[in-house]
Image (cartoon, grey):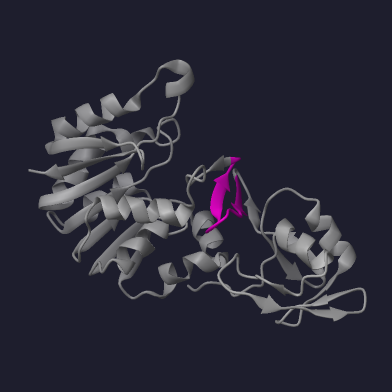
Amino acid sequence: MGVKSLPLITPEVARGILKGERRVSLDLGITHALVEDHGDGVLLPDGSLIGFDELERVAEREEAVYFPREGRLYMAAISDDHFYKLVPTRGAPTLEIDGIRMHRTKGTTPEADAEGKVESLRLNGGNVLDTCTGLGYTAIASAERGASLVISIELRCQVLMMAEINPWSRRLFEDPGIHLLLGDSYTLIKTLPPEFFHYIIHDPPRISHAGQLYSLDFYMSLYRVLKPGGRLFHYTGEPGKRFRRLDIRKGVMRRLRSSGFKNGVYLEDIMGIICEKG
């Protein structure tokens, strides 16, 4: 499996080309490349010819990522029982599933948020379990901080297909120290060896979408595979708190203590709990 090296165009890039810019980013801000005027459109470095009328169409569309095929621009999205699409941000793109963003983007960027989560663990070498791959930003951040091995689990193949298109996810597929497992973390964790991981990054979907990943049974499985003295980061966010006075952190903290974790602390800047195996 490897990242598909497609030129990618956002509505912002399309508007820039229409205004006369010819040095633009075709990989969501990582690098810049030249596009050439060619009749009623522009020629991309891969040989794709995109008409100005097609660029005008995308320039007026919703925020998404588009790729060329036979002169047309198509949204980087998958539709089945759910709707998955890449959405550009001021940094790395986020993934939307049914209109819900899978990363924090307010006041931060997805890659900066991932780096903050890894930083909170004081990660320094060792084995890392990443329970919910997504676009792979926490797995990549762990590898960048020197993790010896990263095991990353993703439930949906559609999410990994989105990651393949995303240039910011390239290291997820190319780093020999990152190993991807496709399946349900709730089930797969029971197959992992005890006391194997030095760190766990647990960044699950909302509790309403994945309640089993907030259960006492799952937390006991996390405790089992973590080495003594190992540290866990558990993202909780603050869903519902503002309007319904709902604070899921209390229940999460209580179940983590019941499963054996100690010294739990909620970090507001990254909206998650840090705790350790006693």
Residue 246 place in picture, x, y as percent: 39, 20
The residue located at (51%, 42%) in the rendering is 106
Magenta range is 83-99
Left or right: 46 with respect to 150? right
Q: Would you place residue 77 above or below residue 2 in this image?
A: above
Residue closer to the observer: 155 or 151 = 151
Question: Can the viewer see residue 228 in this picture?
Answer: yes
> How many numbered badges does the structure rendering display?
0
Q: Is residue 209 magenta?
A: no
Rendered view: 153 above or below 19: above
Question: In the rendering, at what x and y percent does residue 216 appear?
Answer: 23, 32
Magenta-span inclusion, residue 84: yes
Q: Which residue appears at 43% of the width and 40% of the height?
A: 205
Nearer to me, 180 or 178:
178
Percent x, y of residue 29: 59, 66
Left or right of residue 23: residue 36: right
Q: Is residue 139 left or right of residue 273?
A: right
- What residue is drawn where x is 38% and y is 64%? 140
Q: Residue furthest top?
A: 244
Q: Could you tell me residue 81's position as x and y percent?
A: 60, 43
Q: Quadrant of residue 220?
A: top left
Position of the C terminus, as image quadrant, is top left
**Residue 141 falls in which quadrant of the image?**
bottom left
Res 182 seen here: no
